[in-house]
Amino acid sequence: MTLAPTETPATLPQATLMQFGVGRFLLAHVDLFASQARSAGGDVEIIAVQTSDRPAGRGKARALAQAASYPVQLRGRRHGELIDTRLAVDSITRSLVAAEDWAEVHRSFCNDVTHVVSNTSESGYLVATGDSPLAPCPVSFPAKLTQLLKARFDADRPGVALLPCELLTENAGVLRDVVLGLARDSYQDAAFEQWLTAECVWVPTLVDRIVSAELEPVGAVAEPYGLWAIQQVDGLTLPFRHDDVLLVEDLGPYERRKLHLLNLAHTWLVARARQLGVMEQLPLVRQAMEDPRLGGELIAMLREEVVPVLDHEYPGMALDEYVDSIIERFCNPWLDHQLVDIAQNHEQKLERRLAPVLAIARRQGRALPRLAAALAPHTRDTRATPPSAQ
């Protein structure tokens, strides 16, 4: 599923990313990867743009503008090693506030940028009523992006690669369709719409890292595990190389691996803790992992039940190694991951994360007793609903 590297940092062209959002996730994920690639000889820099009106966000953007680097503290386990180290991230070379520096954002987008990265939350693609790319400085991220892309098109500049990091299936396709709709409504320019689809490269990506806390005035605390899976798209040149940045033929198996192993394990823990009545006594994931009725059974369920089913369905995905990483992440001594937080929307999570694996197992003729127990009606706090295959 993963493509062999075809370029080394030394052979990659210079890349300038414009990043929409200065939240702690990007600071400890894409920006950290880019900084480590720079240390290895990669020629990459990031222009960070604070897009919202939140005072805290503006303060963070200003702190980024004043500092040559910021700290990321990695704390947890990886590959059997206990890690507690602080890194200096220097990949953000400019930091701008959209509402204050919009002319400079325009200039940089038209003249300097090769790639676009965003992490504006799952609702970040919504466009408020009355917002438009024709506004002096649009409110929403998609309207801002559409205006900037039109300015670049009008300047007769080549297209850019867009690598959104929002946790949406086919995130790049969703963003592209929103931008195309705004372009069609605002500009009525067929040549611009053709440029958006033919010259710009819309690249689906999947991100995975827990960034647990912010550091003041700017920085983050994160687990050592990190993944940025990027789907191969015609015309894509990666902005940099990094061991945790994977170029893959299809994101689908990686999305399902995360959903039906990592996310499934979280939801199974909640279901089992409720069944045993120990949610209050063992409120944290790492505490639950120390109880053999929870942690021991979880590991057995993943290795003996779920992995064989998924390995048959999605071969070549290194599922055993992925389970090793899940166990290390769940046992992170510095991460206070509350089961009660995972329990939000529990019924929907059971149907989305667990039920499809049971459906696949039935089709394969396999029995998964530990997993099935989590979907038994008596483990639920509300009225049971029949599991669906979605």
Image: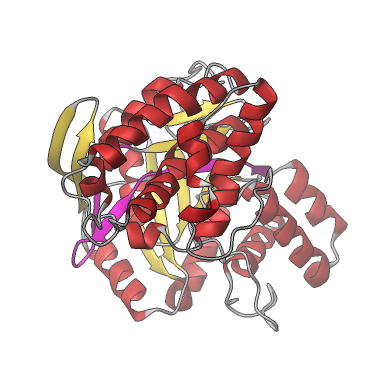
> Above or below — where is 209 with respect to 104?
above
Q: Residue at x 31, y 37 (%)?
A: 225
Whether residue 11 is visible: no
Q: Quadrant of the N terminus?
A: top right
- Is residue 389 or residue 125 the one in the foreground? 389
- Confirm whether the magenta stretch covers residue 330: no
- Is residue 182 or residue 359 the one in the foreground? 359
Q: From the viewer's perspective, is 325 left or right of 114?
A: left
Relative image position of residue 201 (x, y in whole percent): 66, 41
Q: Residue at x 62, y 39 (%)?
A: 356
Q: From the viewer's perspective, is 209 left or right of 258?
A: left
Looking at the rendering, the stretch of residues picked out in magenta corresponds to 201-225
> Above or below — where is 300 with respect to 217?
above
Q: From the viewer's perspective, is 366 left or right of 120?
A: right
Whether residue 194 is visible: yes
- Is residue 324 or residue 239 the one in the foreground? 324
- Confirm whether the magenta stretch covers residue 222: yes
Q: Quadrant of residue 367 in the image?
A: top right
Relative image position of residue 320 (x, y in whole percent): 40, 21
Instruction: Check the image and name the residue furthest to the bottom.
Output: 130
Relative image position of residue 371 (x, y in whole percent): 49, 37
- For the rendered model, the colour scheme is secondary structure
In the rendered picture of this protein, how many numbered marks are placed on residues?
A: 0
- Is residue 225 or residue 86 the one in the foreground? 225
Relative image position of residue 140 (x, y in whole percent): 59, 72
Q: Quadrant of residue 109 in the image?
A: bottom right
Q: Residue at x 39, y 50 (%)?
A: 46
Q: Residue at x 59, y 18 (%)?
A: 312
